[in-house]
Image (cartoon, rainbow, N blue to C red):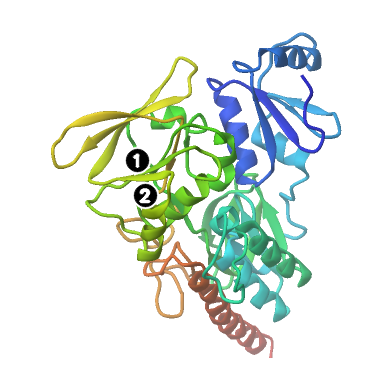
């Protein structure tokens, strides 16, 4: 068996939790890779054993330069990929937690004001926009733009102004160190200080919590069609759970690969825009099932998704829908686990703020999808980043004036 020369190859098995973790990490960092399943390609066992001195160690990850890692943790993978995970300084004017469109826009505005800016992002810069197949409603792109391209443009623009960006680094807590400083501690053990902190962590795709879902994530259950859709080229049937804009858009994208795509919606009608609904219903290889919820995801003998059990909410009747892949798009939950007890959150975990984007902690601001009341749209997310940056500038100006009085 010959491996690809131009990209990373992950060799493993569907039942291997470390394999799923490694694949998820690479997907989160938007790193292209080939997946070789030993159950489908037993001849690859010879490669694994040859690289590991006869040991059957998985995942074995082979890089284009011929080097490899065996059973690596996320930290080891990040180091091998050359991701920047430590900042050059320990103190900044502004630290932005989250490198999506909100954080990147705020960073560009702040850096242009000659403020020192550090972005800390637990995945890859660009946020959800970076893993969206195509954006057709962002101003300035009459023909639409690929999500990864827009994200890369924003990142490069921020870096041009001297913004530092840490990647694959999670923030563990944010605390008020004094009247003028806020401290941010990361999972890598580093602590950074800033005169102002912006929370722009966005939100995560919600899970169904149906039986079997957790065990099959990465082995048939997915949350990003752009990342994992190509694995279903030639698949007979793929399900999309959720009939909102995201579900319909991703369902249309999946028709490039799967022979047929079925959209399953909880309510009695689709929730997406009329334009998307019309496209889906007119598509020759798409179907819609409404008034149904997912009861369970069932695996086959190979450990991969084989069928999805649905329950009709009106009749209570249950049925199994054969599918080799299921993509879940049923809403968003805010990325605020690390903020519980630090900031005031609403009942769903979104951060509360005033009209100036200020949170309950002095010096800490919030913008974008993670903020209660935000519209969860890309254009408004970028706009909030700019608006929050202006409020942060006013805050820094007040601190500067205070320092000047103290030294006068």
Q: Quadrant of the C terminus?
A: bottom right
Q: Quadrant of residue 54?
A: top right
Closer-to-camera residue (42/399): 42
Q: Residue 57, how many percent across, how many down?
A: 69, 16
Q: Residue 116, how many percent across, how many down?
A: 71, 71
Residue where numbered disc 2 is placed? 330
Q: Quadrant of the N terminus?
A: top right
Q: Is residue 340 visible?
A: no
Q: Quadrant of residue 80?
A: top right
Residue located at (36% from left, 44% from top): 287
Q: Residues within 10 Å of mark 2 (few under 14, many from 20)?
A: some
Query: Outermost residue, left direction?
Result: 315
Q: Residue 102's mark?
A: none
Say what secondary structure mark 1 lies in.
loop
| Side of 215 relative to 166 (left or right) | left
Closer-to-camera residue (368/395): 368
Residue where numbered disc 1 is placed? 208
Q: Residue 227, how many percent across, how many down?
A: 58, 44
Residue located at (67% from left, 73% from top): 108
Say what secondary structure mark 2 lies in.
loop
| Side of 45 relative to 328 (left or right) | right
Q: Are marks 1 and 2 in contact (CB under 8 Å)?
A: yes
Q: Residues within 10 Å of mark 1 (few under 14, many from 20)?
A: some
Residue located at (62% from left, 88% from top): 401
Query: Outermost residue, right direction?
Result: 65
Q: Quadrant of residue 382?
A: bottom right
């Amino acid at each position: 068996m010959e491996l690809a020369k131009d990209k990373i190859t992950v060799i493993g098995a569907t039942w291997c939790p470390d394999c799923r973790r490694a694949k998820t990490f690479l997907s989160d960092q938007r790193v292209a890779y080939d997946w070789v399943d030993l159950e489908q390609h037993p001849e690859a066992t010879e490669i694994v054993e040859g690289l590991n001195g006869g040991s059957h160690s998985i995942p074995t990850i082979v890089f284009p330069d011929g080097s490899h890692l065996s059973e690596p943790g996320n930290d080891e993978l990040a180091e091998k990929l050359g991701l920047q995970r430590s900042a050059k300084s320990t103190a900044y004017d502004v630290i932005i937690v989250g490198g999506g469109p909100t954080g990147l826009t705020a960073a560009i505005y702040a850096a242009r004001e000659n403020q020192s800016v550090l972005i800390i992002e637990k995945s890859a810069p660009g946020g959800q926009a970076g893993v969206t197949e195509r954006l057709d409603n962002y101003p300035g792109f009459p023909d639409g733009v690929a999500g990864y391209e827009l994200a890369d443009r924003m990142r490069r623009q921020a870096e041009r102004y001297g913004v530092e960006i840490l990647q694959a680094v999670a923030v563990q807590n944010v605390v008020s160190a004094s009247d003028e400083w806020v401290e941010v501690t990361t999972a890598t053990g580093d602590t950074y200080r800033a005169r102002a902190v912006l929370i722009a962590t966005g939100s995560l795709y919600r899970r169904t919590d149906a039986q079997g879902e957790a065990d099959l994530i990465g082995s048939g259950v997915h949350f990003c069609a752009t990342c994992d859709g190509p694995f279903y080229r030639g698949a007979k049937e793929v399900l999309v759970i959720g009939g909102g804009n995201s579900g319909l858009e991703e369902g249309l994208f999946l028709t490039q690969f799967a022979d047929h795509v079925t959209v399953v919606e909880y309510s009695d009608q689709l929730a997406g825009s009329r334009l998307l609904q019309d496209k889906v219903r007119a598509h020759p290889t798409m179907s819609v099932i409404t008034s149904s919820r997912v009861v369970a995801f069932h695996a086959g003998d190979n450990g991969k998704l084989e069928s999805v059990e649905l329950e009709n909410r009106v009749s209570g009747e249950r049925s199994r829908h054969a599918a080799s892949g299921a993509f879940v798009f049923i809403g968003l939950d805010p990325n605020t686990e690390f903020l519980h007890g630090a900031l005031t959150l609403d009942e769903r975990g979104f951060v509360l703020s005033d009209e100036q984007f200020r949170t309950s902690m002095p010096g800490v601001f919030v913008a974008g999808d993670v903020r209660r009341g935000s519209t969860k749209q890309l254009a408004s997310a970028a706009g909030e980043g700019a608006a929050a940056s202006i409020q942060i500038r006013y805050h820094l100006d007040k601190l500067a004036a205070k320092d000047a009085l103290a030294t006068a």
